Image (cartoon, helix red, strand yellow):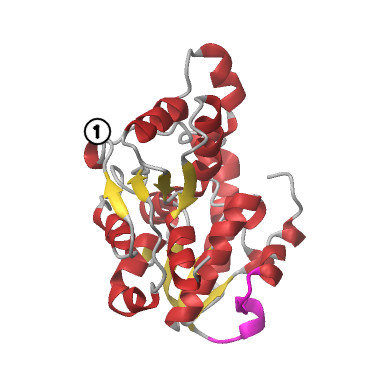
């Protein structure tokens, strides 16, 4: 991400709530939250991470992050052919996870979910890991009464490949969206198992300029047009990569009227009335 490791947790000072760091906390927690690189450094990713922190705090979740000790899951590097770098990062991450006591690993992004759940076990890491949508859907009984402010929007949801097809989670994101008062959820023609890739997986996130020169239209642009065709004014996502990819795509396809927001941001808006 072009930023130094020492700034990985710089975002927490402006989140509006206290965010515990494992090294400083010095005790076991129920949830170790793996924030991820994009939510730690990219401005739009930080928006979602800050929203997650406020939601976890409001729910009374006993959580902490790794802070400056957190490093990238390196799955994009693996998929781009950098196996040696991936194995080096995997070894570091597993050692760091094992330094602390926690019951469940909650991740912000589907790519990290797939890496920790399906790839890291080959290297000896076998601990409970869930995406934030799955985790929050479990707490809907407590979360729903907190969603007091209507978000009067027509929303369509994009299924991330690594959350849906690779890990079978289709319901939790929709349950969260439907719990928000004022939301009208409309589906794109290609959804759930038949959802359309945004083009960011397999290292594609870092090859966008190359792809643009070799195709008539990016996958993200095709998907943005599908979202706009539903009449929705919000495209909801559950992957940090997708916020920036689709934000660019709605502009390049002339669909600036469609806002691209992470589900975390929508929940946070309903809680806070912003």
Q: Does the segment drawn in magenta span residue 16?
A: yes
Residue drawn at (51%, 26%), measured in percent from left and top? 254
Residue 152 as seen in the image, left or right of residue 86: left
Span colored in magenta: 15-27
* Horizontal side of residue 168 vs 13, given as left or right: left
The picture quadrant where one finds residue 125 is bottom left
At 30% from the left edge and 73% from the top edge, which residue is drawn?
140
Q: Residue 131, can we see it?
A: no
Residue 111 picture location, percent across and down: 45, 47
Q: Nearer the viewer, residue 113 or 225?
A: 225
Is residue 102 shown left or right of residue 26?
Answer: left
- Dot 1 lies on which element? loop
Residue at the extreme bottom: 27
Q: Position of residue 204 (x, y in %)?
A: 51, 31
Assess whether residue 94 is covered by the magenta stretch.
no
Report the residue marked by disc 1. Answer: 189
């Amino acid at each position: 991400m072009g930023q130094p490791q020492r700034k990985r947790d710089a975002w927490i000072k402006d989140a509006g709530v206290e965010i515990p760091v494992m090294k400083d906390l010095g005790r076991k927690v129920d949830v170790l939250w793996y924030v991820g690189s994009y939510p730690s450094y990219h401005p739009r990713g930080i928006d979602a991470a800050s929203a997650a922190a406020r939601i976890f705090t409001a729910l009374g979740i006993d959580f902490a992050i790794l802070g400056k000790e957190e490093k990238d899951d390196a799955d994009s590097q693996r998929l781009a052919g950098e196996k040696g770098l991936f194995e080096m990062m995997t070894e570091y991450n597993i050692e760091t996870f094992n330094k602390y006591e926690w019951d469940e690993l909650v991740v912000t992004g589907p790519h990290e979910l797939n890496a920790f759940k399906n790839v890291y076990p080959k290297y000896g890491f076998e601990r409970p890991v869930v995406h934030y949508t799955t985790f929050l859907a479990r707490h809907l009984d407590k979360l729903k009464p907190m969603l007091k402010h209507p978000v009067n929007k027509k929303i369509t949801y994009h299924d991330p490949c690594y959350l849906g097809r690779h890990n079978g989670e289709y319901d939790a994101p929709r349950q969260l969206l439907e719990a928000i008062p004022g939301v009208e959820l409309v589906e794109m023609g290609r959804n759930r198992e038949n959802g359309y890739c945004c083009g960011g997986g397999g290292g594609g996130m870092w090859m966008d300029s190359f792809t643009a020169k070799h195709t008539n239209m990016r996958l993200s642009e095709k998907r943005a047009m599908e979202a706009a065709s539903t009449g929705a004014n919000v495209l909801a996502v559950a992957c940090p990569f997708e916020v920036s990819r689709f934000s660019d795509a709605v502009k390049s396809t002339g669909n600036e009227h469609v806002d691209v927001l992470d589900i975390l941001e929508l929940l946070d808006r309903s809680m806070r009335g912003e």
